[in-house]
Image (cartoon, grey):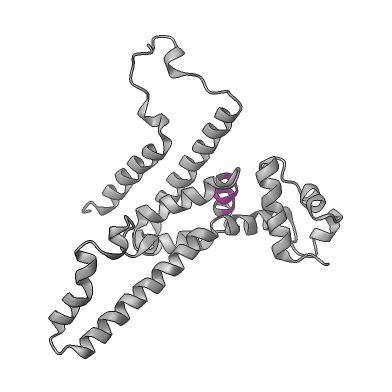
Amino acid sequence: MRNTLADVVAAGLRVLDAQGLEGCSMRRVAAELGVQPSALYHHVPDKQTLLALMADEIVAPVAREQTAARAGAVSRVEDVARAEAAVPDETAARAEVTAPVEAGGGAAAAGAPAGGPDADPRSFCVSLRDAMLAVRDGADVVATAAAFRLGASGIERSLGALVGADGARTLLLYTFGHAQSTQTHRQAAAFGALVDPAALPGRGAEEAPDPDLDLDASFGRGLDIILRGLDAPR
């Protein structure tokens, strides 16, 4: 059976997860599919294009969350419209529709921001980082594609709609960089290459651990700093 473009992208992601970005060559992708490397060029003109498509696939979960969030927002607007049509008092209608959420129901009760990542730049960036970290060297692939405008461009546009072009670029650079640092940290830990901070000169075992070693919490703190700056009056 002849391979499709989707098969080539999926094979590229399998090789990436097994070999890392450095080992993700066209030759290895072709071997994963059981074809000659020249067969790949029927689907992609070069490796850069393949990496761009892989980047788009890595961030696809974030795009799906955005689509779901938009659908939820449309549904809420339609609910309000239907309630207003049924109840003459517009204020009462709107209160009836929004009361469950304001009382702690719906997405808010589940710990999710109202509107999902499409309406919340913080959750957007958290979801993006999670998607990149789910694939070996995923942050490197997505960051490289974005830097050269090769792929994942929808992510920057969507975030820009929330915080403006400059805010989106700042948040993406921070999210990419933190995800890349986290990947490096995880790989070093897997190879046993991390040094126990308590063993360093001048550090004692009784000292509190470095808070930056909790990379998830560190990422959240950094996001909050950037978002506070974006919200500050200019």
Q: Viewer-proximal residue, 62 or 142?
A: 62
Magenta-tinted stretch: 140-145
Q: Is residue 75 above or below residue 184?
A: below
Magenta segment main secondary structure:
helix
Q: Viewer-proximal residue, 44 or 207?
A: 207
* Residue 3 rendering spot, x and y as whole percentages: 79, 64
State the residue at coordinates (66%, 41%): 20
* Magenta residue check for 141: yes
Q: Quadrant of the N terminus?
A: bottom right
Q: Is residue 159 above or below residue 200?
A: below
* Magenta residue check for 97: no
In this rendering, position of residue 25 left or right of residue 116: right
Q: Is residue 207 above or below residue 26?
A: above
* Residue 138 rendering spot, x and y as whole percentages: 58, 47
In this rendering, position of residue 21 left or right of residue 218: right
Q: In terms of image quadrants, where is residue 198?
A: top left
* Residue 147 rendering spot, x and y as whole percentages: 55, 51
In this rendering, position of residue 23 left or right of residue 35: left
State the residue at coordinates (80%, 55%): 33
